[in-house]
Amino acid sequence: MKIVIIEDEPLTARDLAACIVAAEPSAEIVASLASVGEATAWFARHEAPDLIFSDIQLGDGKSFVVFERLMQLVPVIFCTAYDAYALEAFRAAGIDYILKPFDEKSVGSALEKFRALRGAPAVSRGTGAILVFYKEKILPVKVGDIALFYLQNELVRLVTFEKKEYIVNKPLEELEGLAGGAFYRVNRQFLVNRQAIKDVSQYFGRKLLVNLCFLWEEKITVGRLKVNDFLGWLSGS
């Protein structure tokens, strides 16, 4: 696995390289670059690596500039002291976002995400079913047909991609386990299917606003503390 580090603090770069090799002995650090200019020049002359570890705020600008200029999409694990750039990071091919001070455990966890993403099969809709109440009947609804679950007036409801809505006699906490990894509990009220998400945008207070692939009037937001984890899930890592 060939890895490039972009970090303007030499001691931090050495520590990061040591953590990477400790977590992944087969890793080869092919370059350690200290600025936007140096990184841009290096990538113009060399073959793209398998993975990049990068700080964001460098002495001559933000590293996002480097990734905008890359001709080939390379996954990036951002390692930074700031938590304000999460959305930009994931737009720039970011697959994880580690806050400094990092350690071997956090670096190893990020590498696990990279390995899982590289070997992950295409996401497909689930084949299980959730039982729902409709009039005086109980119906099975395939998990893959469900766009989201939501809590309203103490009742849990599900909405299908066809915008059919049913009451579910289970709490959201239990549905998280039944629905599987294709769903994410974005907040107390909503459990959303990845395939139902059209895009996300920045919202007040460093939150994210989740926009669905169909018309939904109520705002669905992700709190600041869950942004990094949510974006990692959304990217499939």
Image: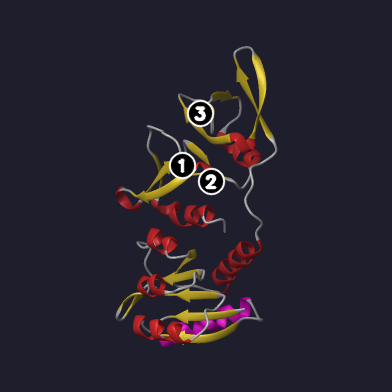
Nearest to N terminus: mark 2 or mark 3: 3
Kindly identify which numbered label has been placed on residue 187: 1
Q: Which residues are magenta?
A: 9-23
Quarter residue 160 falls in: top right
What's under tag 3, amino acid-wise? Answer: Lys
x then y, percent, for residue 82: 36, 67
Look at the numbered disc 3 and give the secondary structure of its residue.
loop
For the point 60% across and 17% down, the residue is 134
> Mark 1 or mark 3: which is in front?
3
Q: Nearer the viewer, residue 152 or 117?
A: 117
**Looking at the image, residue 180 lies above or below residue 150:** below
The residue under label 2 is 194
Label 2 Cα neighbours within 10 Å, binned few <14 / some 14-19 / many ≥20: many
Q: Residues within 10 Å of mark 1 (few under 14, many from 20)?
A: some
Q: Which residue is mark 3?
A: 163
Give the mark count.
3
Residue at image point 41% right, 33% down:
216
Residue 148 visible (yes or no): yes
Task: Decide whether residue 187 is among the magenta residues.
Answer: no
Question: What is the spatial separation of the Cα atoms under label 1 and label 3, in whole angstroms?
Answer: 21 Å
Tell me residue 98's x, y (percent): 47, 67
> Which residue is at a point 39% across and 58% down the rendered structure image?
87
The three-letter code of the residue at mark 1 reads Asn
Sequence order check, earlier mark of 1 and 2? 1
